[in-house]
Amino acid sequence: MQQKEEADKIHSTETLCYNCNKMGETQVITLPYSSMPTEVIHAFFCPHCNTRDVGFFDKETEMHKKLIITCKFQSKDDLQRYVFLQEGSKIFFYKGRRILYKYEVPTSTVMVIEMFLTSLIRKIAEMINVDPTEELVFSEENEESNNLESKEENEEDKYEESKDREILLKKIGEIKHLRNTGNFKLVIHDEKGKSRVGLKDQQCPDQLYCAHIADLNDGIVEHKYPKKRREE
């Protein structure tokens, strides 16, 4: 009898692997000791690419999966919120209606949003070997000299690298401006549905990843599961 009850708490299904797009297996295990019957352990394994993923979260996430978080920050105070970013989530920074910068989260992490922006600035700066604390200056003279160099034999690659460097330098300056003003739009797309942006003055970041999205929505941040399209 006890074995049957334990078996009823484990549900296995075939799931499309988010890494290689082949079929893997997902096990959803309801926690027998939990005070909330919707709290589960989610375990995924793909035998084709050996992708493994284990998480502890609410069953509501398992039902909806993909999550979109829209943040319309208005001041630097809004950047003091904690954010939990699930590995593989895509982040879009907007300047008006234009996407200013796109970033894919390499490792799941919890941090204050302002610190996340500072970390992102440092990562971009490391890519082009510049000091992220320096004031960035762009001059037409440098652009003209790069054009002259590009005309030299075997210098075309150097010119392309120089253009890429100039673009990234400008991105650093623009992200610094977002951080310094706190007035911008940020959108998170999470295919696993685990990312969260905390409330203002929330002091328990460790519990953020399993929070109900309805408890986190306010006039600045909205967590939303997009409606699934009906198959024709």
Image: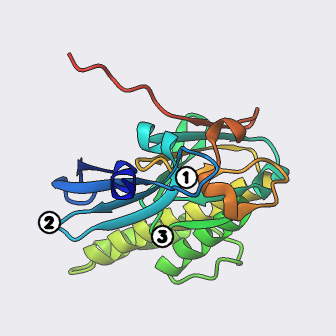
Q: Earlier in the sequence, mark 2 or mark 1?
A: 2
Cα separation between marks 2 and 3: 22 Å
Mark 1 is on which residue type?
Ser
Q: Position of residue 46 (x, y in %)?
A: 22, 63
Q: Label 2: few (<14), some or many (≥20) within 10 Å?
A: few
**Residue 158: percent from left, percent from top:** 33, 78
The mark nearer the N terminus, 2 or 3, is 2
- Can residue 65 be seen by looking at this rendering? no
Label 2: element kind: loop
The residue sitting at 53% across, 44% down in the picture is 38
- Quarter of the rendering containing residue 180: bottom right
Residue lying furthest top in this view? 232
Q: CA distance from mark 1 to mark 3?
A: 12 Å
Q: Tell me the element at label 3.
A: loop
Residue 140, above or below 134: above
Q: Which residue is mark 3?
A: 107
Horizontal side, residue 227 vs residue 129: left or right: left
Q: Residue 172 placed where, x, y %?
A: 60, 65
- Residue at the location (34% across, 58% down)? 3
- Mark-to-mark CA distance, 2 and 1: 26 Å
Closer to the chain start, of discs 1 and 3, is 3
Disc 1 is placed on an element classified as loop
Q: Nearer the viewer, residue 62 or 94?
A: 62
Amino acid type of the residue that numbered disc 2 sits on in the rendered structure: His
User: What amino acid is at disc 3?
Assistant: Thr
| Residue furthest to the front | 1
Residue 25, x across and y down, in percent: 23, 56
* Residues at circles 2 and 1 in contact by the CB criterion of under 8 Å: no
Residue marked by disc 1: 195
Residue identified by numbered label 2: 48
